[in-house]
Image: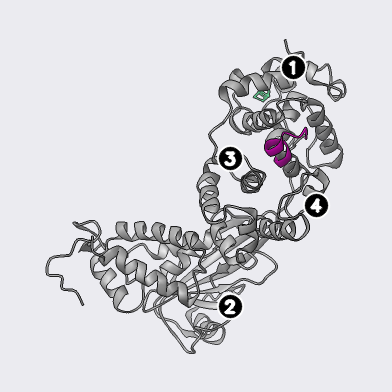
Amino acid sequence: MMRPPASTEAASGATQRDGFASALLAWHDHHGRRNLPWQHPRSAYRVWVSEVMLQQTQVRTVVPYFERFMAALPTLASLAAAREDQVLALWSGLGYYSRARNLHCAARLCMARHAGALPRDAAALASLPGIGRSTAAAILALAHGQRQAILDGNVRRVLARWHGVEGWPGTAAIERQLWHLAESHTPTTRVADYTQAIMDLGATVCTRAHPRCASCPLAAGCQALRKDRVATLPTPRPRRSVPLRATTLLMLRDTAGRVLLERRPPVGVWARLWSLPETPQRLSDDTALAAYLRDHCGVTPGPTTRLPGFTHAFTHFRLQVAPIRCDDVRPLEHIAEHPVRRWCTPADWTAAALPAPVRRLLESLEEPPMSRTVFCVKLGHEAEGLAYAPWPGELGKRIYASVSRQAWQQWLAHQTMLINEHRLNPLDAATRSFIATEMENYFFGEGSVKPPGYTPE
Ligand code: SF4
């Protein structure tokens, strides 16, 4: 029978004898998650990538990203050899891109300093970029069965509630106390199962908003439950005022349906990702906007729409975004070779590493202003057509004339798979040529259904 600790101080000396670990392991045997993709096989590399992806992100979101990442970069050596653009593109949509950059950098350090493998020493592992004490412990416990205590967000919550720990876990003193508790509960056997179990319990039972105490294997000894403090523990971070910044994002689309993207600087928000041209200026009237576009973006504007603004939250500030959409802009200068700017088709930007709000804005561009119907060569029946030609030249016109929105979305998913599989840079000329050939085959190849009256060019 699990005994509740008499106090937090007493609990800090808890050992496996308190039944905490055995209750968790028994629960894990029936309810633990055993079919997560990084568990088969559970190599150090796969556990590492999954742990980094799972920071700030839920399992169901991570699974498809993890599978895509592993299909493209199955080993630490392949990750080290990859271009940063490819790693960021595989990460695109997961957010917190410094995680991807650190992963890439750590893989290269492992190749240079650790004979191409993740070190098995906790201190050496924790010193790699993006791998803190808890992530290092999780890798060693899950992949090698080493007795290492973890303290991620889920574990913090379980321990703070079970022991009734008062105080925000972000302070050094409370964090020290929680580490001590985590170490005291970690068993000497079945460490990998225990580690998975406590993570799973925090993610599925002792959740932040709706803990399921009635189904919890630790309920008998839980201080928070006993004292009716479940809703108030762990103690939340003290309120602080978060600064608000403002920016204007420019969605400049030319007559071929391409949008102008530019690469962000190497430091700061969204570092090195592709994004929309941005200005802190309000540009509230069309004259100011036209002057700005001419002087800073090298284009003359066409029809302009000021879209509804939104706020995006970062860790240390909130960004108030005012998007402006300009269609049919005309470049004043040739910027195809500009080092940080590119005109991108939907195929280009779909596969590129973009911040999530920018991707959402670009996706909104694809929504057609009015519905039109085409005979879709891929689906073999009439369906809603695209709003504009999604690729330059004759191929773009053919797609516009005879490919439905549904089939185009299917192609975009296929294209992402191709780019990952062949480790391509979506923005270079060779990739565009390869993609054009694949696209033509995909829609107009041997197996496609020809529309009525179709004659090959
Ligand atoms: S009893 Fe409730 S609060 Fe306590 S550990 Fe279980 S789920 Fe969390």
Q: Secondary structure at mark 1?
A: loop
Specify whether residue 144 is painted magenta. yes
Image coordinates for residue 140, horizontal then vertical, percent? 73, 40
Q: Is residue 168 above or below residue 269?
A: above
Range drawn in magenta = 139-148
* Colour theme: one colour
Query: Is residue 387 visible to us here?
Result: no
Q: Secondary structure at mark 2?
A: loop
> Disc 3 designates what residue?
41
Specify whether residue 376 is painted magenta. no
| Residue occupying the point 81% across, 49% down | 124
The mark found on residue 127 in the picture is 4
> Disc 1 designates what residue?
19
Q: Who is closer to the viewer here, 317 or 439?
A: 439
Q: Nearer the viewer, mark 1 or mark 2?
A: 1
As drawn, the residue found furthest toward the left would be: 453
Q: Who is closer to the viewer here, 130 or 111?
A: 111
Amino acid at dot 4:
Ser
Q: Quadrant of residue 364?
A: bottom left
